[in-house]
Image: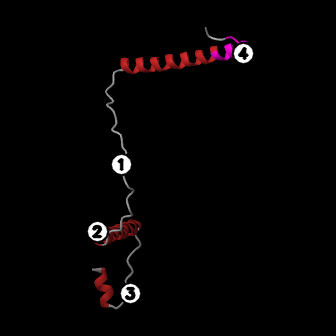
Amino acid sequence: MIKFLYKLFRLEYEEPYCRTCEYLKMLVEIERREKSELLKRLVDPPVKEESTPIPQNLNPIGSSKQSWQTFKSQLERADYLKAQNERENKIAALEAELNVTNG
């Protein structure tokens, strides 16, 4: 009604400032921009870069359903062999130092 009176008397009508309205206008503008960008991507999708070639010498991954006991025994065996190797190396070094031969 007020707008009509302003038009009737040829006065300029200014809408009151509303923070909520400005915020909503800004949100609508952001949504429109995002929608426009999505439409551009759908209509004209970006060109994919060359994919990396897949190596041909792939080994299948073993089953991970190994029991803890089996895994533990493998670790213990590896530690035992490592300790035995170190012990033999120390003995060989001492024999070399003392000029002792096996036999």
The residue at the point 37 percent across, 66 percent down is 27
**How much space separates mark 1 and mark 4, taking CA atoms?**
51 Å
Q: Which element carries disc 3, helix, strand or loop? A: loop
**Which region of the structure is painted magenta?**
92-100
**How much space separates mark 2 and mark 4, taking CA atoms?**
78 Å
Dot 4 or dot 3, earlier in sequence: 3
Q: Which residue is mark 1?
A: 56
Q: Nearer the viewer, residue 90 or 24?
A: 90
Number of numbered markers: 4
The residue at the point 40 percent across, 66 percent down is 23
Q: Nearer the viewer, residue 31 or 64?
A: 64
Q: Position of residue 57 (x, y in %)?
A: 37, 45
Q: Classify residue 4 by image quadrant.
A: bottom left
Residue 97 image label: 4
The residue at the point 38 percent across, 62 percent down is 50
Q: Nearer the viewer, mark 2 or mark 3?
A: 2
Q: Which residue is mark 3?
A: 12
Q: Examine the rendered structure and indicate whether residue 84 appears above or below residue 47.
A: above
Q: What colour-coding does the image apply?
A: secondary structure
Residue 42 image label: 2
Q: Examine the rendered structure and indicate whether residue 12 appears above or below residue 89.
A: below
Q: Nearer the viewer, mark 2 or mark 4?
A: 4
The reply to whether dot 2 and dot 4 touch (C-beta < 8 Å) is no
Q: Nearer the viewer, mark 3 or mark 1?
A: 1
Q: Nearer the viewer, residue 74 or 23?
A: 74
Q: Is residue 82 left or right of residue 94?
A: left
Q: Which element carries disc 1, helix, strand or loop? A: loop
Tell whether position 96 is magenta: yes
**How much space separates mark 4 and mark 3, taking CA atoms?**
110 Å
